[in-house]
Structure formats: structure tokens, C-alpha cells
Amino acid sequence: MRKRRIAPQFSHPLRAAWRRATGLGRSRVGAGRQYSDRMFPTRPAWLPSLGTCFPSGCAVCGRWPALPAGKPVCGDCAQAFAAPVARCPTCALPLPPDTGAGAGTATHTQTHTCTDCQTHPTLLAACFAAVDYGYPWQSLIHRFKFANEPAWATWFADMLWEQTALRPVARACDWWLPIPLTRHRLGERGYNQAWELTKAIHRLAAGTMPANAPTLRHDVLMKVTDTTAQHHLDRHARLTNLRTAYAVHPNAAHALAGKSVLLVDDVMTTGATLHAAARTLLHAGAASVSAVVFARTPAPEADSAE
Ligand SMILES: [Zn+2]
Ligand SMILES: [Zn+2]
């Protein structure tokens, strides 16, 4: 695990100067003060562009070099495993082929709501996903989350932002929030993959944002209960735990009133996580909650990936 730099405990004037100069050593109070924009504040702007200068192998088929240059997965693999499919606009599940939109343009014409969402409307105003959770994305997401490879966020964001239906919804939201981790999990991992994805999408969208561009906030929603180790509980108990797993930070509660929010996460399995977070935000006064995830489990059975 990367060794973290700790700010020296100077007296107050020197500490303020240290904070201004390095961006390190800010208050540790709050929901998201350990994110990587603070942990690696001096990363030069030219560093990400290095990836386009040196060829690399495709992470799926191993072909070298992966083309187009600078992409971690070659064009053939991306085309083979990320073909656009028609998805329900409120749960992002693939729609049956007989619901209208053709596969080639499906992600750009999300107009058909699935029968489940028609019968039981969800809390989400809209929901977008780039791919189905399965081969080969499953292993790449695993590397993104568990192998200290947050740079996958850039490429996952590329695939998400290709969906033209997502863009107006995302731009119209007031706040973009990552699904948070508990402080313990964040400390273990060193970064929140959902926050990395949020920032990567924002970098892509930055040039086309309206004057009142969405604000990225990692200090609004907190995860206060660890819900990963509850396999011994039945489904009802797990859902009950999940309902109390999120909270709105008291400092942000007032400003949240009336805001339209976009939640960002890497994977959506049953949707229980996103719905629990959305319920918390709506109860706290948010006007609407939409969601965007990189991968959606097509036949949800469990919360294991969340
Ligand atoms: Zn390939
Ligand atoms: Zn649906």
C-alpha cells in the first residue's frame, strides 16, 4: 500500500503556509478528506498524456501494441465486448430485443422503460450504464477497485461519455456525488474508485459544461456502516442494514435542499446500494437523484459486487 505523507505538526501560521503550498494537511474532519486529489496534489498536468506516447498491450486479448494508441483495450475487443444495447432509462437493465430501439443506436435512444420500472417506479430519475458486468469487464473492474489501478477510471469514463443520452442529464445536475466508502475501507484502499470515475467523467465533460456547471462533491454523502461482511444475514436484514448505511454530512445538508444530484458508481448489481443512497439524499431534501455506473449486472442475484 502506498505510504502516505503526513503533514508536520507546525504551529498555526506555519501550518497554514504548509497547507497553501502543498495542499496537504487540511482538516481531517468530514466525509471525504482522504481522496487522491489531496493525497497526490503535485501530479503534473502532462503526466496522463505520457500514456499516448508509449505503446502497451491490450488488457483483454494481449495484442501488442493495443490500437488505437494510448488505450488499454484494443478497438476490436472494445467493439466485441461493449456493443451498445438498449437499456431501461431508469434501471439500466438491458431491454428485450422486441422493445423497439435497434441495438446499434440503443444507448442513444433510451425511451423504453422496462416492465419492472413501469410496475414499481424506482427512486432514480435516470440511470445509465456503459457495459454489462461480465467478461472481460469484471476482471478490469477488479483491477480498478482492488489492485491499486485507479487510472482505469479514465478509460471507463471515455466509454460512459460516448453515450449521448447521458450528457444532457449529467450536465443538468447540480451536484455529482460518488457512492462513498466507509472511512475504514477508504483507508485500506487508498482511493474511492467511484470518486476517481466521477472526476474522470468531469474532465471529459469540462469543455462542454453550461455556465452553472455541476459541482463535484465528495463531502456530502457518507457511508457510516460497513455492509460488505453481512453474508450471514438474510436478504431482508441486509436491505435493512443498507437503508441505514448512508448519511448526509451535517455541513452539506442545508445546501442539498432542492439540488438535482448525479450519483456515480463503478458497478450496479441489484441496485440496492444506489437506491439506499438515493433514498438518503431524497429524505434530506434533494430534488432528484440520477445515477451513472460503468457496469450493470444483467441478471442481478446478490449484492456481492457492490
Ligand atoms: Zn484486444
Ligand atoms: Zn427498468
Image (cartoon, rainbow, N blue to C red):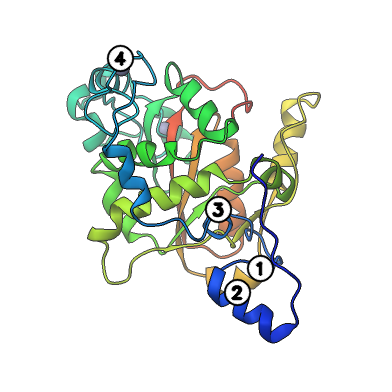
Is any atom of residue 109 visible in this view?
Answer: no
The answer to the question of whether label 1 and label 3 lie on touching residues, with beta carbons closer than 8 A, is no
| Mark nearer the N terminus (3 vs 2) | 2
Q: Position of residue 48 (x, y in %)?
A: 36, 46
Q: Residue at x 68, y 86 (%)?
A: 13
Residue type highlighted by circle 3? Ser
Can you say which quadrant of the picture contains the N terminus?
A: top right
- What x and y, as percent, mark residue 154? 38, 42
Mark-to-mark CA distance, 4 and 2: 45 Å
Q: Which numbered marker is on residue 19?
A: 2
The disc, 1 or 2, on the residue closer to the chain's N-terminal end is 2
Residue appearing at x 37%, y 49% in the figure = 47
**Disc 1 target residue:** 25
Mark 2 within 8 Å of ligand 1, using the beta carbon: no
Of the 4 image quadrants, the one containing the C terminus is: top right
- Amino acid type, mark 1: Gly
Instruction: Reply above or below: 168 against 287.
Output: above
Q: Are circles 1 and 2 on residues that touch, CB within 8 Å?
A: yes
* Between discs 4 and 2, the one toward the N terminus: 2
Q: Judging from the image, what secondary structure is the residue with disc 4 in?
A: loop
Q: Is 79 left or right of 5, judged from the image as shown? A: left
The amino acid pointed to by label 2 is Arg
- Front disc: 3 or 4: 4
Mark 4 and ligand 1: say if the CB distance to the nearest ligand atom is below 8 Å. yes
Give the residue number, with chain letter if any, for mark 4.
63
Q: Depth check: give the residue in front, 242 or 184.
A: 184
- Say which label, 1 or 3, has the lower sequence index: 1
